[in-house]
Image: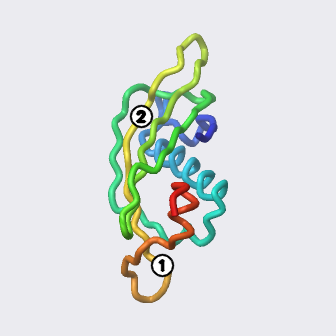
Amino acid sequence: MHRSRVEWSDTDASGHYHNAAVGRFVEAAEAALVRERGVVGYFGAAPRVRYEVDFASPLWFGQQVTTVLAVERIGTSSMTFGFEVWGEESDGRPRGLAASGRYTVVHVPPRDERVSEPWPAAWVEALTGNP
């Protein structure tokens, strides 16, 4: 779970969030998860290969946001995360689901030949609690 706020740069001319802001909220939650679990070397080695979002309701400038992120599946070299982005109660509006979805990353260690490889066992254990 990661908490943030809708910033002015996250909004469009109507004052509510632009769809691309969801990606920023979700990536911030992913970064927090990876740091919390002590996974070193993940960034730059896990490009996105699929991303899907269902938009449910607007978020407004200044509104607090809670992003819930979970590892849904870890394969040999791919990993799928599920997420929900919630707008917290604000200006008389109740707390509500703003967006939900999932995305898949693939383990591609940085080097000249960009091919997928199995996830390091230590990363799998750190992210799932299973060796």
- Judge whether 104 appears above or below 76 on screen: above
Instruction: Give the SS element for disc 2.
Output: strand
Image marks 2 and 1: residues in contact by CB distance under 8 Å: no
What percent of the width, then of the height, locates residue 71? 46, 50
The single residue placed furthest to the front in the displayed view is 131
Q: Quadrant of residue 118?
A: bottom left
What percent of the width, then of the height, locates residue 9? 57, 42
The tag earlier along the polypeptide, 2 or 1, is 2
What residue did someone put label 2 on?
Answer: 99
Q: With 65 as the anchor, is 113 left or right in this view?
A: left
Q: CA distance from mark 2 to mark 1?
A: 30 Å
Instruction: Give the SS element for disc 1.
Output: loop
Q: Nearer the viewer, residue 92 or 76?
A: 76
Front: mark 2 or 1 = 1
Q: Residue at x 53, y 52 (%)?
A: 27
Q: Which quadrant, please, contains the N terminus?
A: top right
Q: Residue at x 46, y 67 (%)?
A: 46
Name the mark on residue 109.
1
Crowding at mark 1 (Cα within 10 Å: few <14, some 14-19, many 20+): many
Colouring of the image: rainbow
- Judge whether 87 appears above or below 38 on screen: above
Q: Residue at x 60, y 14 (%)?
A: 91
What percent of the width, then of the height, locates residue 121? 51, 71
Q: Which amino acid does the dot numbered 1 rest on?
A: Pro
The single residue placed furthest to the bottom in the displayed view is 112
